[in-house]
Image (cartoon, rainbow, N blue to C red):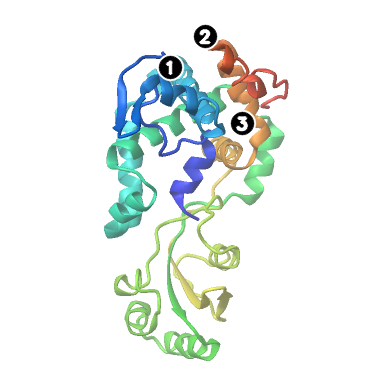
Amino acid sequence: MDVFFIMKKWLLAFTALLLTVGLAACSKTVATTSGGKVTESDYYDSMKKTSSGKQILQQMILEKVLEKQYGNKVSDKKVNAQYKTYAKQYGSSFASILSQNSMTKSSFKKQIRSTLLLREAVKDNTKISESQLKKQWKSYEPKTTVAHILVAKENTAKDIIKRLQKGESFSSLAKKYSTDTATKNNGGKLSAFDNTDTSLDSTFKKAAFALKQGEYTTTPVKTSYGYHVIKVLKKPAKGTMNEHKNELKNQIIDDKMNNDSSALQAVISKVLKKGNVSIKDSDLKDVLSSYLSSSSSSN
């Protein structure tokens, strides 16, 4: 799953159309043609009638009120740290992925900030019960680091397992046989993941979490990519629920951000109502009606 599309889902259509839309009508010329000129007021009058234009206005308003209410909780340090995390995750392909998503370093950092502000709002407007924590604890797995060898045929995977059982190096076998070009030269090592990871196949994760540190799968693990041999490189002890309460709360908040659209809309409604938004253009007076009329609970 692409991180960039996840983040876009959290927002209200933060699109590449966010260019030079002005909220006050004016006569500055945007473009000239042989048939006449296009002014900012022409452009504005046209844009405000489109669904994309209304979505942009919703986003701009939301960003203003979020910044006012939660801006002091999202530092540049947090934004830069998350940016570096994504940059590290995607490595040499990061620049091209930004380009494919019509983003620059600056616009991506702006999107990260918007997401973190919205997350603070969700956190502030969500009460987490003990029963919710217990439910989350049942599926909790600590950050686990594994290496894998991916091959196309099951018999090849079985042969690799036999060679591991004879004492051959997992790293050497990964470099020689794995078809995962992104990891094979690093011994098949993947970035650490926990129970909330959505980028890996569920069958792969289940097999990995079932292993102890230092163990590898003794039967091939089949996914849509082929057959995997998995070895756990690092797996911290799970510990107790009380030791991980903050982490569990964060997982619950992240789940709301990703998967609970009704809760997210309720939070946005509260934020907008608190922001005392007043729409001055009569043609756009109902642009926030779907949010301001929300009466659902975010808890």
Residue placed most toward the observer, 296 or 170: 296
Toward the viewer: 299 or 215?
299
Q: Nearer the viewer, residue 212 or 40?
A: 40
- Which residue matches tag 3? 264
Please, what secondary structure does the residue beneath circle 1 have? loop
For mark 3, does the 10 Å Cα neighbourhood hold few (<14), some (14 to 19), or many (20 or more) residues?
Answer: many
Residue type for callout 1: Leu
Work out how far the residue at label 2 is from the one at label 3, CA to CA, in angstroms. Answer: 26 Å
Pointer 2: what residue?
Answer: 280
x%, y% of residue 242? 57, 37
Circles 2 and 3 in contact, beta carbons < 8 Å: no
Task: Give the x, y percent position of residue 105.
Answer: 28, 41
State which mark lies toward you, 1 or 3.
1
On screen, residue 179 versus residue 253, left or right, reads left
Q: Earlier in the sequence, mark 2 or mark 3?
A: 3
Which residue: 61% across, 18% down?
A: 270
* Placement of 260 over or under 101, stated as above or below: above
